Image (spheres, rainbow, N blue to C red):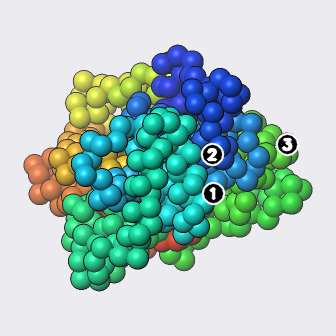
Amino acid sequence: MNERHNRSERRNHDARRGPQEPTAAEQPAGKRAFPSKASPARLAALDVCRAVRERDAYAQDLIASRIDEARLSPEDRAFATRLVLGVVSAVGTLDEIVDRSLRSPTDVQDDVRDALRIAVYEIMFLDKSPHAAVDQGVELVRSVQPRAAGLGNAVLRKVVACKPQFPFGDPTRDVAALARLHAFPLWLTKRLVADLGPRAAVDFMRASNEPAPLFIAVNEIKATSDEVCRAFAAASSQVEPVALDGKAVPGCYRVPDSRVLQDRRVKSLFSEGKVLVSDAASQLVAACVLPERMPASLLEIGAGRGTKTILLQSDALRAYGSQVELFSLDNHAFKTKLLRDRVEEYGVAVVEALTGDATRLDEVVGARQFDAVFIDAPCTGLGTLRRHPEIRWRLTEQRMSEMATLGLSLLCSAADHVARGGQLAYATCTVTHAENNGVVKRFLESEQGAGFELAPLGDRSCLATRLQPGSSDAHFAVRFVRKR
């Protein structure tokens, strides 16, 4: 998975920015700028949405620090979380709807727009009672700018009036209407239709707006699947083994209800390094990119904070009976430090945790070669939209092209460091042709890729999981073998 989007790393980054102000839901009414009759859940959601905008932050990080830890009822916490994730996933579409109800987009200031987005999301995407959504939306506006309450009321009533016409066109014929219906940017909708085909693109967009399921990985180094299943059963949760495309994912289980993570017996599994949270497709990638025979050495590029490192060594123990001689590499020193701390916690062996630019691998590892090299490539992360909904509105076509170029550079740089007969694996958590099959084709046609050929991953030519409701995230992986 693209580690740049990892919640814990971003939370660490936020912590370095200093202490945060109390959330709106946590502040006593008398200490708020304007006492509000808005519900606690909506006030908490407004606080997080404002912070996402002001700090260009990620919603999941702020939900963890400002909603999960707030003095809210479980129902309010769940509703606030749903509002935040919904608003950040649909923000461009919500702004278009708001602007349709204004004389000019500049008629509302940013903090008022934050409040209006929440109410419009409820009206358009949650089918809330129009009266309740308008009333609470006006109260949210009043909480930030009392003088704008009248404008907020007028805007929201226009939104209610235009709801029957949404998405303002036939989504089966009009790609702009299709984009609005699923709250995607128009350019990205066109790209998905071109890359995936119309039906698969619609399935992808629809699934991207569904809640993400929860999967755990059993760390074979410290626990057995039976031990983990018994602990969850004792906490009244029956975890389910996972198979993707008919292939069992070793050590992977789906957790039907995340509330079980608060049980002391389950908490102890995490604190002792016996399990970790990881998407099922990410776990399948780790299992599939290991060579059939135990390699003498393995270099992991793009190791981040070590999630794949843990998965690789856990799967190596299952496949070979022991961990492999593993070297890790990331281009950020703080991530390397996090990895060192984390692999020690999980009992994972890493020969050397390196920091450096993998597009200039010679400068990092010299002339060393490895029996296996695995590139967990930086990418647009579109396969993880359910967990990182901001991506769709922050992404640009230029950024997508840059990620594809970076992926190719990583492969070309790594090629000389694969031993004869060795393996080079490449993985992303996106679905675009440019970053996946396009990179593979460009590499094989390059001077550095001329000495490689594609090799199957198990019983398939590549791994490409699809994003569907209730499914894992969408990941991609291929394997090359260096000719002897």
Left of 425 or right of it: where is 293?
right
Residue 121, can we see it? yes
Image quarter hosting the C terminus: bottom left
| Residue type at numbered disc 3 | Arg
Residue, disc 1: 214
| Neighbourhood count class around disc 3 (C-alpha, 10 Å): few under 14, some 14–19, many 20 upward | few
Residue 316, can we see it? no
Residue, disc 3: 264
| Neighbourhood count class around disc 1 (C-alpha, 10 Å): few under 14, some 14–19, many 20 upward | some
Residue, disc 2: 38
In the rendered image, the vertical position of residue 185 relative to residue 334, given as above or below: below
Q: Distance between the residues labelled 1 and 3?
A: 18 Å
Q: Residue at x 74, y 63 (%)?
A: 239
Label 2 element class: loop
- Percent across and percent down for residue 208 are 45, 63
Residue furthest right in the image: 234
- Percent across and percent down for residue 171 are 30, 78
In the rendered image, the vertical position of residue 142 relative to residue 177, given as above or below: above
| Neighbourhood count class around disc 2 (C-alpha, 10 Å): few under 14, some 14–19, many 20 upward | some
Q: Residue at x 71, y 67 (%)?
A: 240
